[in-house]
Each structure stands twice: as structure tokens, then as C-alpha cells.
């Protein structure tokens, strides 16, 4: 397999982003996550903070309309720009890791695609979020639920199948079972096996 | 009958909510609701095979009046004339786009004004309005906005004011003719109007408003359009208009076909050819002229919109056959207390406000039978019997400009801008276009009062 595209879907707090970053290091390929935000910020002249707010966000249904594939929603257009960006990267033959952005579906058909979904036990996710964001348990739980709800709506709007549905991904894995480090090791082994 | 009325209303409201929510593609929504109307309202509740047969209205295809009409007549059921005409024009527009007609026209005009920003701004507004009189505004804006962005990048100006003005003028131009905007085609074919009827009535006020809008947009946007970084235009660096033409023979043929379509539409009250005949003829000659590309052209026709229309007409028939639309007409008549001025103002402004937030096509299709019911009251008062039709057309066409979701052209224009790095928020859009809409509606109100009442 000359091209490797690792698509990482993730539940908030599952360590998906850390796993994606570590996989990018181990395979020595770039990762597109924050980079996609700065890329769009440069193109639109909006600030990265503004893009961050609209990033992986569902549109506001009552004030959005779609006509023949065109949408007035800035969220939708930012999403489309990101889909175009990763599609062009994939078409160029480059190997990379991409976090979220419905990449498991948008890049379907590329031979080098390995799609992963990282989930986690709620207790473990709360613990992680409490540590990273210095929140209490109640706030951490609400934060996780809010973030996941947003990701789910975003994903399910742009893709016909449901976010987190195991049939969408090559491998869905609960990072709470082995812990983040061992999950990465396991995924590395799996990806190397896929690469032949 | 009560059960039929309840189901007709429930199906209609469900259809509207589902269209707004945009969870299911809108043609599935209207078709699904249309099937439910046929089965539940007409089949189970009314047990009326005649109502179903009249609504499907396929027999219309086999009548002479569908193709050749000497006297005005009103149609009921699925408005096949609208569907056939829109389908025909879609084929023609695809042929023109394929040959590079629209891009060529935009570049040609930019060259004619020596690629200077303000003259481009003014000529593109006029071009947007004129093209939208004959071609659907989605196509007009799709090409115009793309060329505007391209020129903005080359000439270093902000394309957003220009795109916003083009969107507004496309909607305004669409209001001027029978084929400019789908609500006009629905109003025209349902009430037996000609292209010329629209041009002489809505077209006259659209022309006045266009001049005022160009002035308005010039005043509010001129500072944004003049860039501090603007350099002297080097025309040699710009793409030549001729480069836009992908197929010279196809380009000439599609230009001729477009010319024929315009002539047929302008003269159809004299030739008695209906819009259905014109649409069919134009589609056939486009396909003959692009013989090798027939599958490609047919594939590009927006069947989803055509199916959307079919379902929509059935659901509206459900409301009409069960008498619901008569209740709405009576309600409007009651609240206006027989005052025709108030009735005209209600139709115009209600249509405009509704069209600013919901698709104006279902709204127009629903309101046509309502204004038909109100027509005798208008005539009895001594006013022009078609006043409400013009109020409905102007309201639905112009009201749609007020918000980014009000009309298809707005969605396409803002999307093309955003995809090229110029996102347009609701605030940015409404700040200038909502006041422009109110100005045009105010002018239209005065026009309707002075001319017809």
C-alpha cells in the first residue's frame, strides 16, 4: 500500500486526538486536525477562533437552506471546504492522518484508507476531561455530552450513516479497555498488517 | 368532509415543517405528502375518484389548450404546464452552460467596461436582472457569482457587495416576466396570463425598482468596492472572453436557441403557443443541436425540482378540493373588511414576509387558488381583477431577497462566495438587502394602489 490515510473518528474524551497524533508520529506522516482550521482561516480571512466555533458544527436548521448542493450556512461551507481539502490531499497521493471531518465516508474508495473510531467508557472519559479541562465531574459529563451531540449532528447531516456506527469504520475500539498507550500499539499493529 | 379537511391541513403543515427542517430531501417530502393526499384525503375520506383524476390532470396533455391556447383559461390539479416549461428551459440552460455561454457573457461585459470595478458592479447588476427575466436565477447567479469572485481576486476588490447586489437584481429581474421566477410561472399558467401581461404589469414596476436599487446599492457599497490595494488594471493578465467558449459550434447554436426562446416567449400571446409548447420545442431543438451530448444534458436536468413541483401541486389540491383555501380567502376578505387596498397590501406584504423565510414556491402555489377566490370581490369593487395576482407575484419574488434563505439565488450566491473564501453571515446579508427589499416593496405597494385601484 503506497498511500496510507488514517481516518480517526472519536468520542469526546476518548483520547482519539492523542491517538491520532501518536499514530502520525509512528508512521511519520502529517496530521490534519488544527491545520484544517488554519487552512480555512487563511482562505476565508476569518480568525482561527471564529473557524474553531464553526468547525465540525452542525448548521442551524431553521436559518439554513440547501439548493442543488449549495448551502447558505457558513458551517456547511466550512465543512465542504474541509472535505475538499482532504479529498485533494488524498487524490495527490499523500499519506496523512485526519481527525474527524466525516473522513471515513468522504475518503471512502481510496485504497490506502484505514478508518478507525475511538470510543471510551463514560467514567474514563469524564476522568480524562476533568484532568485536562480542570472541571468537576458534573461539568465534565455535560461537556462530553454536548460535544458528542454536536459531532453526531454534524456527521449525520453530511453522511447518510450514523456517527459511531461500527459498519462505517474498519475498526471501532474502546480506548478505556487497554488504555491509550496500548490502544495505540494495537492500532499500529493493525495498520501495519493492513499495509502488508 | 371535516376529516378530509383535517387531513389535508395536517399533511400540508407536515410538508412545510419537513421542507424547513431539511432532514429529508424536499422532493421526497412533497411526493410522500402528495401520495398521502391522494390516498387519505381523496381516497379514504372523500372517496372521490374524480378528485384524484382531476388532481393528477394527465388528461391535460391530450387537450389542444395545453399546447395552443386562443383564450385565457385557468388550470387546476398538477400544473403540468409549469413542469414541462421548467424542464424545457433546464435543458436549454444546460446546453448554454456546456458551450460556455454564461462565462463568456460575463467576461465579455467585464471587458467592455475595461474591467473597472464600479462599471462592472453596475453592468453585472443589470445583466443579472435581464438574464433572470428569461433564465432561472439559480443558473444566473451560479455563473455570475463565480466570475465575480474570479474578477475580484484578479482586480483586488471585495466581491461580497457585488454578489449581494447581483442576488437582489436576479430576484427583481425574475419578478418582471412570467418565466423569470417559478411563482410567476405558477401564477401565469394557473390564471392564463401571457409573458407580455407580466412584462406590462410586474415588469413595469421591476424596471423602476431596478434603477432605484442600482442607485441604492451604489450608495451603500461604493466605499467597500473601491480597494486601497487596487492597481491599474492590466487587461492582458485577465482571461479572454473567447477562452470561456468550450465549443464554438455549440456556443453559436445555444445562443440562437436562446434567442428563439426569448422571441417565442415575448410573442406567445400573439402566436397562442403555450409555455408548455415553448418549453417542449426549446428542449427538442437543444437536444437536436447537441445530439451527441443528449445523455449528458438529460442527466443534468434537475429532476428533483420537477418531482418537488408535482408533489407540491397535489398537496395544494388537497387544500383546494376540501375548501380550506376558500376559508383562507374568506378570512383575508373578512379582516380587510372589503377594503381592496388593505387586501392588496395584505397579499403583497404577507407574501413577502412569508417568502423571506420559507420557500416561495409552495407559498405561491397555495395562494393562487386563494386569490382566484378573492377575484370577484376585487372586480365588484371596480378595481382591476388581476391586481391580487400582481401583488402575489411581486410579494413572493421580491420578499425572497430579504434573507439568505428567502430564495434559491440567495442560497447559491452566498454559497459560491463562502466556498471561495468570502463567507456571508445572516447579519452581513440582511443589513443591506433587507432595507432594499423594504424599499422595493414600498414602491410596489404605491404602484399597485396608483395603477390598479
Image (cartoon, coloured by chain):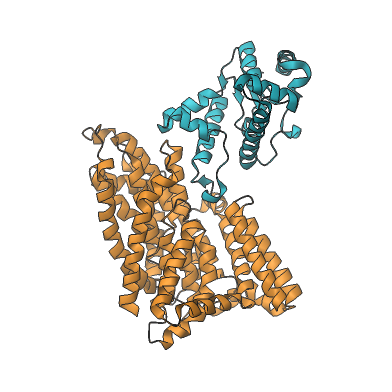
Q: Which x, y percent locates residue B131? A: 37, 57
Quarter that holds the N terminus of chain B: bottom right
Image chain in cyan: A
Q: Which x, y percent locates residue B142? A: 43, 48
Q: Quadrant of residue A98?
A: top right
Q: Which x, y percent locates residue B263? A: 37, 67
Residue A51 in view: yes
Q: Residue at x 25, y 50 (%)?
A: B219
Reply above or below: A2 against B92.
above
Q: Is residue B133 left or right of residue B11?
A: left
Reply above or below: B318 against A64.
below
Q: Quadrant of residue B439?
A: bottom left
Residue B74 in view: no
List the single residue furthest toward the right.
Answer: A177
Q: Residue at x 67, y 42 (%)?
A: A160
A126 and B103: which one is in front?
A: A126
Q: Quadrant of residue A183?
A: top right
Q: Residue at x 44, y 51 (%)?
A: B410
Q: Which x, y percent locates residue A118? A: 71, 25
Q: Residue at x 53, y 37 (%)?
A: A80
Query: In the rendering, what colour is chain B?
Result: orange
List the single residue furthest toward the left.
Answer: B232
Quarter that holds the C terminus of chain B: bottom left
Q: Is residue B97 left or right of residue B321?
A: left
A123 and A5: which one is in front?
A: A123
Reply above or below: B432 against A51.
below
Count the marks: how many?
A: 0
B428 and B198: which one is in front?
A: B428
A129 and B113: which one is in front?
A: A129
Amino acid at each position: 500500500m503506497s498511500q496510507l490515510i488514517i481516518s480517526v473518528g472519536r468520542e469526546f474524551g476518548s483520547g482519539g486526538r492523542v491517538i491520532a497524533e501518536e499514530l502520525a508520529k509512528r508512521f511519520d506522516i502529517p496530521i490534519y486536525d488544527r491545520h484544517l482550521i488554519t487552512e480555512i482561516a487563511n482562505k476565508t480571512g476569518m480568525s482561527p477562533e471564529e473557524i474553531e466555533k464553526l468547525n465540525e458544527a452542525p448548521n442551524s436548521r431553521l436559518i439554513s437552506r440547501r439548493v442543488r448542493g449549495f448551502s447558505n450556512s457558513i458551517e456547511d461551507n466550512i465543512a465542504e471546504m474541509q472535505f475538499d481539502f482532504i479529498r485533494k490531499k488524498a487524490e495527490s497521493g499523500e499519506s496523512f492522518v485526519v481527525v474527524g471531518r466525516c473522513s471515513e465516508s468522504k475518503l471512502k474508495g481510496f485504497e490506502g484508507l484505514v478508518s478507525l473510531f475511538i470510543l471510551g467508557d463514560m467514567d474514563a472519559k469524564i476522568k480524562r476531561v476533568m484532568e485536562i479541562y480542570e472541571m468537576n465531574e458534573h461539568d465534565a459529563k455535560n461537556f462530553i455530552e454536548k460535544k458528542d451531540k454536536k459531532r453526531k449532528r454534524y456527521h449525520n447531516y453530511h453522511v447518510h450513516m450514523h456517527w459511531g456506527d461500527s459498519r462505517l469504520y474498519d475498526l471501532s475500539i474502546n480506548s478505556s479497555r487497554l488504555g491509550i498507550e496500548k490502544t495505540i500499539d494495537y492500532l499500529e499493529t493493525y495498520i501495519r498488517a493492513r499495509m502488508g | 368532509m371535516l376529516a378530509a379537511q383535517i387531513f389535508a391541513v395536517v399533511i400540508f403543515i407536515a410538508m412545510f415543517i419537513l421542507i424547513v427542517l431539511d432532514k429529508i430531501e424536499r422532493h421526497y417530502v412533497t411526493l410522500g405528502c402528495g401520495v398521502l393526499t391522494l390516498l387519505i384525503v381523496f381516497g379514504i375520506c372523500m372517496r372521490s375518484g374524480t378528485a384524484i383524476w382531476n388532481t393528477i390532470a394527465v388528461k391535460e396533455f391530450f387537450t389542444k389548450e395545453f399546447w395552443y391556447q386562443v383564450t385565457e383559461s385557468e388550470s387546476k390539479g398538477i400544473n403540468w404546464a409549469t413542469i414541462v416549461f421548467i424542464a424545457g428551459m433546464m435543458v436549454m440552460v444546460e446546453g448554454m452552460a456546456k458551450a460556455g455561454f454564461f462565462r463568456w457573457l460575463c467576461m465579455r461585459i467585464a471587458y467592455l467596461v475595461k474591467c473597472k470595478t464600479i462599471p462592472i458592479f453596475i453592468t453585472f447588476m443589470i445583466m443579472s436582472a435581464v438574464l433572470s427575466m428569461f433564465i432561472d436565477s439559480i443558473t444566473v447567479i451560479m455563473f455570475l457569482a463565480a466570475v465575480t469572485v474570479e474578477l475580484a481576486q484578479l482586480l483586488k476588490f471585495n466581491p461580497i457587495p457585488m454578489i449581494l447586489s447581483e442576488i437582489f437584481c436576479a430576484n427583481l429581474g425574475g419578478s418582471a416576466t412570467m418565466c423569470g421566477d417559478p411563482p410567476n410561472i405558477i401564477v401565469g399558467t394557473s390564471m392564463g396570463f401571457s409573458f407580455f401581461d407580466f412584462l406590462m404589469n410586474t415588469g413595469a414596476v421591476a424596471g423602476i425598482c431596478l434603477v432605484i436599487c442600482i442607485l441604492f446599492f451604489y450608495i451603500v457599497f461604493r466605499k467597500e468596492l473601491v480597494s486601497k490595494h487596487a492597481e491599474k488594471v492590466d487587461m492582458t493578465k485577465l482571461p479572454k472572453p473567447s477562452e470561456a467558449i468550450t465549443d464554438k459550434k455549440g456556443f453559436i447554436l445555444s445562443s440562437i436557441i436562446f434567442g428563439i426562446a426569448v422571441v417565442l416567449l415575448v410573442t406567445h400571446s400573439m402566436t397562442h403557443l403555450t409555455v408548455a409548447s415553448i418549453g417542449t420545442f426549446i428542449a427538442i431543438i437543444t437536444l437536436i443541436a447537441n445530439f451527441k451530448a443528449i445523455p449528458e444534458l438529460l442527466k443534468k436536468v434537475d429532476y428533483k425540482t420537477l418531482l418537488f413541483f408535482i408533489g407540491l401541486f397535489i398537496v395544494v389540491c388537497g387544500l383546494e378540493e376540501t375548501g380550506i383555501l376558500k376559508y383562507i380567502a374568506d378570512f383575508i376578505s373578512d379582516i380587510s373588511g372589503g377594503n381592496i387596498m388593505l387586501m392588496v397590501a395584505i397579499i403583497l406584504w404577507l407574501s413577502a414576509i412569508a417568502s423571506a423565510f420559507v420557500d416561495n414556491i409552495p407559498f405561491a402555489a397555495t395562494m393562487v387558488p386563494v386569490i382566484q377566490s378573492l377575484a370577484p370581490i376585487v372586480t365588484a369593487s371596480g378595481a382591476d381583477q388581476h391586481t391580487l395576482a400582481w401583488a402575489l407575484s411581486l410579494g413572493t419574488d421580491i420578499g425572497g431577497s430579504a434573507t439568505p434563505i428567502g430564495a434559491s439565488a440567495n442560497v447559491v450566491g452566498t454559497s459560491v462566495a463562502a466556498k471561495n473564501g468570502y463567507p456571508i453571515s445572516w447579519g452581513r446579508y440582511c443589513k443591506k438587502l433587507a432595507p432594499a427589499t423594504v424599499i422595493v416593496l414600498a414602491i410596489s405597494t404605491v404602484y399597485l394602489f396608483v395603477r390598479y385601484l
